[in-house]
Amino acid sequence: MQVSITGRHVELTEPMKAYVSDKLQHLKHSFDHLLDVHVVLSVEKFRQRCEVSMQANGINIHGSDETEDMYASIDGVVDKINRQLKRYRSKLHRHQAGGRREGRKINISHSVLDLASASEELTEDHQPATLRHESIEAKPMNVDEAVMQLELGNRDLLFFTNSQSDSLNAVYRRPDGALSWIEPEAA
């Protein structure tokens, strides 16, 4: 776990840095895959604020707390983030528990085609060459689980069998970072 600590209008002392690092080490017990943690300590008049942003296995978690004592603010934000990490871990554990899913698995074929360059003219009988072909298994899950799997993984598209409708669905990350859900309409 890589920790960076920044101070705004506050002098970062070694005991304060050690206190922050010690508190953040306790978060590793809640979630094993913490990668990057950024802490900002700031003082504005009588408000002592601590903000923590972290990346944990594809999830971004943010928390902040503001009190009149910096050490109390650090304790407060660590408690908030610890609750968030436990919630994510229990959600993940619930979704990964086997045997409770309804629905069926669907195999999907995915091919990458070699399109002709713009300078070439295409004939009617032109068949593009297949560069790569793979089979994807769409596992049964609900939409919440699919979104969580997409956020936890390092992919931008996830096909799944919707356990409520038993139809093929997809969730994907748009270029602006928002998530979208594709569901077929009943005919």
Image (tube, grey):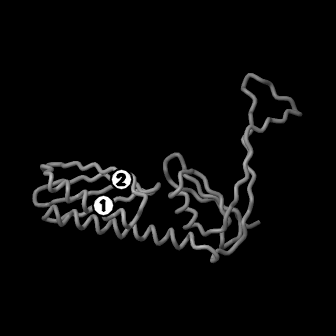
Q: Which residue of the protein is positioned furthest toward the top in this rendering?
A: 119
Q: Which SS class for mark 1? A: helix
State which quarter of the image contains the C terminus: bottom right
Question: From the viewer's perspective, is 170 left or right of 38?
Answer: right
Q: Considering only vertical position in the picture, is 21 above or below 100?
A: above
Q: Quadrant of residue 69?
A: bottom left
Q: Which SS class for mark 2? A: loop
Q: CA distance from mark 1 to mark 2?
A: 9 Å
Instruction: Please state the horizontal and vertical placement of residue 142, each as a whole percent of the image.
Output: 60, 69
Mark 2 neighbour density, 10 Å: few (under 14) some (14–19) many (20 or more)? some
Q: Amino acid at mark 2?
A: Met
- Whether the residues at callouts 1 and 2 have beta carbons within 8 Å, the answer is yes
Instruction: Please state the horizontal and vertical placement of residue 169, each as a whole percent of the image.
Output: 66, 61
Quickly name the residue at label 1. Answer: 25
Q: Which residue of the protein is positioned furthest toward the bottom in this rendering?
A: 100
Q: Quadrant of residue 130?
A: top right
Mark drawn on residue 38: none
Q: Amino acid at mark 1?
A: Gln
* Residue sitting at x 22%, y 62%: 74
Question: From the viewer's perspective, is 32 left or right of 9?
Answer: right
Q: Which residue of the protein is positioned furthest toward the left in this rendering?
A: 45
Q: Nearer the viewer, residue 122 or 157?
A: 157
Instruction: Please state the horizontal and vertical placement of residue 91, each as a whole percent of the image.
Output: 49, 71
Mark 1 neighbour density, 10 Å: few (under 14) some (14–19) many (20 or more)? few
- Total marks shown come to 2
Whichever of labels 1 and 2 marks the residue nearer the N terminus, that label is 2
* Residue sitting at x 28%, y 48%: 4
Quickly name the residue at label 2. Answer: 1
* Residue sitting at x 19%, y 49%: 7
* Residue sitting at x 34%, y 59%: 62
Instruction: Please state the horizontal and vertical placement of residue 151, each as a whole percent of the image.
Output: 51, 57
